[in-house]
Image (tube, grey):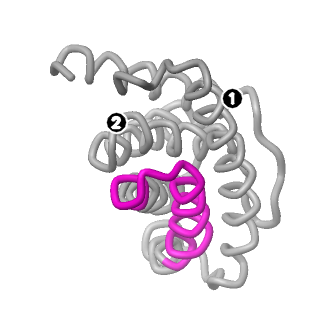
Amino acid sequence: MNRTRLLTTMAVFVAIGTLGAQLLWFPAGVARAYPVQHAVNVMAAVTLGPGPAVGIAFMIGLLRNMLGLGTLLAFPGGMVGAFLAGWLYRLTNRKGLAALGEAIGTGIIGALFAVPFARILLGSSAGAFFFIPSFLVSSISGALIGWFVVSKVNQVNLLENRI
């Protein structure tokens, strides 16, 4: 894929993730669940790979924070999930494992990264047991949406040339 096409595709994913955060969210424990972010992570991981997926997750987190639509916790969760989804997909070429990587990467590993992050930057003393359920609900629901989308897109051979 040429550089212009890659950057354009990444920009579209960033726009979808940023706008989707404003349109679709629900309360999940101590945090809000933004399943569109996780769906975009899975779709970007499958179509573009782990590096661009992490960049997209970072940009979505940055824009959401600048627009007041998210918290700083969007960074550790989204970026770890995007990386693990892309890495597992690259290793196995299975979309289901990309979704599982997003759920584990964000729901468990990202939640554990969020504990010191929240303590240092947000002054919150909430532990992992507060973050893991919220992160899991958000990441599992979004990963399933992303898995569904890439599976349906693949059925009509749109990913044959990997965008």
Mark 1 / mark 2, whichever is N-terminal: 1
Report helix, strand or loop for mark 2: helix
Amino acid on which disc 2 is placed = Leu
Name the spot of residue 106 as percent of width and height, x first.
Answer: 55, 63
Quarter of the figure with the C terminus: top left
Viewer-side residue, 73 vs 137: 137
Q: Is residue 86 above or below residue 107?
A: above
Viewer-side residue, 102 vs 11: 102
Residue reaching furthest to the left: 3
Q: Which residue is mark 2?
A: 48
Q: Can residue 10 be seen at all in this image of the molecule?
A: no
Res 22 label: 1
Alpha carbon distance from label 1 to label 2: 24 Å
Crowding at mark 2 (Cα within 10 Å: few <14, some 14-19, many 20+): some
Instruction: Identify the residue shown where x is 38% and y is 38%.
Output: 56
Amino acid on which disc 1 is placed = Gln
Name the spot of residue 25 as percent of width and height, x first.
Answer: 77, 40
Q: What residue range appears in magenta?
A: 88-112
Per the image, is 143 magenta? no
Instruction: Identify the residue shown where x is 45% and y is 33%.
Output: 63
Q: Quarter-wise, where is residue 146 in the image?
A: top right
- Disc nearest the viewer among 1 and 2: 2
Name the spot of residue 71 as percent of width and height, x first.
Answer: 56, 51
Q: Is residue 120 above or below residue 7?
A: below
